[in-house]
Image (tube, rainbow, N blue to C red):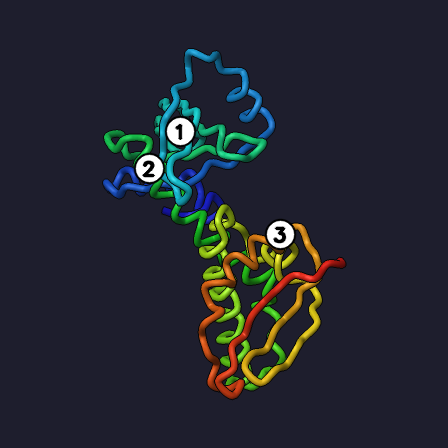
Amino acid sequence: MFDSKFTTYQNLGKLNAEGVKFLTVRRRGRNLVADIEALPDTAWKRLKVECAEGFRTLRVNDSLVPLKGYGGEVRQIAITGHGKIKPALLITNDLSTPAESLIQTYARRWLVEKSISEQIYFFHLNRVSSSIVIKVDFDLTMSILARNLYHLLARELTGYGQCESETLFNKFIDNMATIRYGEEKVEAVLKKKRGLPLLLEMGKSFDAQKILWMGNRRLTFSGATIS
């Protein structure tokens, strides 16, 4: 299982000749996309594929097609209804595994790729602060820790379990607050924001917890009346 740019169709033919199973995506040229979109409705079938949110219904065309340089026909699975404008095209020499299983298998690779991309563009994983190894290790550790904390936050917010970190930052984290420091608790009074009620509801489960490094005070959150 690999990306479309990893190897050539000629090499895929060699893998097939040696009995090695492969699963990859096909490069989508303009003419190829037009041919896929021109397929009649009878050429498509609907599949329910399990995903992180439960199940998603996809339109799938499963067929054998010739591939230039491959030396024969390859199984092509065209997918629409996955949230993208262009259809996704999987190609494989596995003719027996059900299409939904192949889609789920490759979807796991997409999730890994998405996670790496997010860590680069949002957490700047590729912009380390120094060439000194110990500082690089620290940067990587803190970037991965930050990403995991965002992931844990998403799991606590109903309806946002699969949101990207940038979306969570814009909707919930990017805000200002007035801090009230008392003898028993520290209260953060957050300014009004569209997603604030959901964040405050989630935060109620932590109201009773005492934080050691704050002198065993409780940390509570509330909403201000102004934005």
Instruction: Tell me the element at label 2.
Output: helix
Q: Position of residue 71 (x, y in %)?
A: 36, 30
The residue that disc 1 covers is 77
Q: From the viewer's perspective, is residue 45 above or below residue 121?
A: above
Label 3 Cα neighbours within 10 Å, binned few <14 / some 14-19 / many ≥20: few
On-image quarter of the C terminus = bottom right
Q: Position of residue 125 (x, y in %)?
A: 56, 68
Label 1 Cα neighbours within 10 Å, binned few <14 / some 14-19 / many ≥20: many
Count of numbered tags: 3
Q: Position of residue 225 (x, y in %)?
A: 73, 58
Name the mark nearer the viewer: 2 or 3.
3
> Marks 2 and 1: in contact by CB < 8 Å?
yes
Instruction: Tell me if 212 is positioned left or right of 132 in this view.
Output: left
Residue 102 — which label? 2
Q: Quadrant of residue 98?
A: top left
Label 2 Cα neighbours within 10 Å, binned few <14 / some 14-19 / many ≥20: some
Give the alpha-carbon distance from disc 1 to disc 3, as whole Å. 39 Å
First in sequence: mark 1 vs mark 2: 1
First in sequence: mark 1 vs mark 3: 1
- Residue 11: tell me if it is visible: no
Q: From the viewer's perspective, is residue 108 above or below residue 58?
A: below
Question: Residue type at mark 3?
Answer: Gly
Residue 39 — which label? none
Give the alpha-carbon distance from disc 1 to disc 2, as whole Å. 9 Å
Question: Residue type at mark 2?
Answer: Leu
Q: Residue at x 45, y 29 (%)?
A: 79
- Residue 187: tell me if it is visible: yes
Q: Residue at x 57, y 62 (%)?
A: 120
34 or 74, nearer to the observer: 34
The residue that disc 3 covers is 195
